[in-house]
Image (spheres, rainbow, N blue to C red):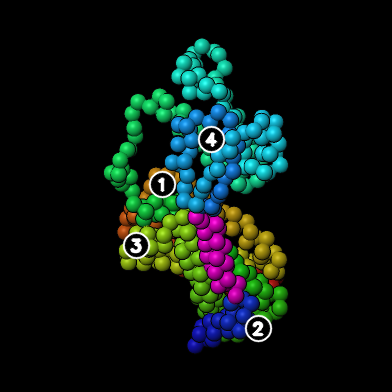
């Protein structure tokens, strides 16, 4: 009953403060909104352009190629240049979007040109304004057309021509590959941030206020005090971890310009269950680590400094596993790293079930060990009262 009372005290401290609740849920919501807006902006439909371009000696073949390359909502009005200087002035002033100058006998010159001769190649001049979005869009599009035209002059074979499907990777596999590389690291960083936000005050704060001393003089077991901190704080931090995970996972497909349906359909029930177990095995582990640090500290400020060092170590473990290939099965015995490696495998669709389950069990075992250590720290007068 004393354990339940201690847990209730921690839950009430959190749920009675709307600001603490908001700090757990808002990060995931903001991540989803920001990433989704970024994805929508990056992968939005091309803007419509009505190009107005002056041209001198424009070959009909280039004109046809450019017209064929235009997308929906793009048109171009070709104007004959009335004079070189006047056309440049119009392009500079913005009356026209660009001024294109070809050599008078362009097609004949490139037909007889030999790159090995060392002679200058026929030159195409494009006058435009890079500060003008429409003028820059024309320049980039016209240069790409000229590149295609140049390649077509020596075209001897085609690659992947026709309507046949050559890419055997579906949309879901593309999403899985990208998410497996970056999502686990982001999730661990967000989990630590959530845990840090609710845990620093748990022991060091009560030591500063003197309320922990009141609890310690009672007959409550030190183990119950440790569990009374870790269990509710883990549940609270799990809210923030779940919110952040969903925010990142749901927004990533939009950020990459892919559909959310392709992401969701890529995984089965067991994959989602394993991700859930891995994430929630890391939460109490990190809570226990921060609680141990907070217990050894004399103030919240001191605990915050020590926890920043711990965060760097945790992120290093995440980075090593996230960006290092071919980590062996031995990684299951290393806390945090085992969860990242297994999350990568689950997201990539190549997980080994026993490794994921062992990783969950190992993280919970480390958590139990830390609860024992925290209980011993709470029983130490030197740690708790500096005696």
Marks 3 and 4: which is nearer the front?
4
Query: Can residue 230 be seen by looking at this rendering?
Result: no
Question: How far is disc 1 from disc 3 in space, using C-alphas?
Answer: 27 Å
For the record, the magenta segment spans: 22-45
Residue hosting label 2: 214
Q: Decide which of tag 4 and tag 2 comes sooner along the chain.
A: 4
Q: Which mark is residue 121?
A: none
Per the image, label 2 sits on a secondary structure element best described as helix
Query: Can residue 122 be seen by looking at this rendering?
Result: yes
Residue hosting label 4: 143
Residue hosting label 1: 327
Residue hosting label 3: 265
Q: Position of residue 158 (x, y in %)?
A: 34, 32
Vertical side of 168 occupied by 31: above or below:
below
- How many residues crowd around disc 1 within 10 Å: few (fewer than 14), some, or many (20 or more)? few
Question: How far is disc 1 from disc 2 in space, using C-alphas?
Answer: 48 Å
Vertical side of 145 occupied by 338: above or below:
below
């Amino acid at each position: 009953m004393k354990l339940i009372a201690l847990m209730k005290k921690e839950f009430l401290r959190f749920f009675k403060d709307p600001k603490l609740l908001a700090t757990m849920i808002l990060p995931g919501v903001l991540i989803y909104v920001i990433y989704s807006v970024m994805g929508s902006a990056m992968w939005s439909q091309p803007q419509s352009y009505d190009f107005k371009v002056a041209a001198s000696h424009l070959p009909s073949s280039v004109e046809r190629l450019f017209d064929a390359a235009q997308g929906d909502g793009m048109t171009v009005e070709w104007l004959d240049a009335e004079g070189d200087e006047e056309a440049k002035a119009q392009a500079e002033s913005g009356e026209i979007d660009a001024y294109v100058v070809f050599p008078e006998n362009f097609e004949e010159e490139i037909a007889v040109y030999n790159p090995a001769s060392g002679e200058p190649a026929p030159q195409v001049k494009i006058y435009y304004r890079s500060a003008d979005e429409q003028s820059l869009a024309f320049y980039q599009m016209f240069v790409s057309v000229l590149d295609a035209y140049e390649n077509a002059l020596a075209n001897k074979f085609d690659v992947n021509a026709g309507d046949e499907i050559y890419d055997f990777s579906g949309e879901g596999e593309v999403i899985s590959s990208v998410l497996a590389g970056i999502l686990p690291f982001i999730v661990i960083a967000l989990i630590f941030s959530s845990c840090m936000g609710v845990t620093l005050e748990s022991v060091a704060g009560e030591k500063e206020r003197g309320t922990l001393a009141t609890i310690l003089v009672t007959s409550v077991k030190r183990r119950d005090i440790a569990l009374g901190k870790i269990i509710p704080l883990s549940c609270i931090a799990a809210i923030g971890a779940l919110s952040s995970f969903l925010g990142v996972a749901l927004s990533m497909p939009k950020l990459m310009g892919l559909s959310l349906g392709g992401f969701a359909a890529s995984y089965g029930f067991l994959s989602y269950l394993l991700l859930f177990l891995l994430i929630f095995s890391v939460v109490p582990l990190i809570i226990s680590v921060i609680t141990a640090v907070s217990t050894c500290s004399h103030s919240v400020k001191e605990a915050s400094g020590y926890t920043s060092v711990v965060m760097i170590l945790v992120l290093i473990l995440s980075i090593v596993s996230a960006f290092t290939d071919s980590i062996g099965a031995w990684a299951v015995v290393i806390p945090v790293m085992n969860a990242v490696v297994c999350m990568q495998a689950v997201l990539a669709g190549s997980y080994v079930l026993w490794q994921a389950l062992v990783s969950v069990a190992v993280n919970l075992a480390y958590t139990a060990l830390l609860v024992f250590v925290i209980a011993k720290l709470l029983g130490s007068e030197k740690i708790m009262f500096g005696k």
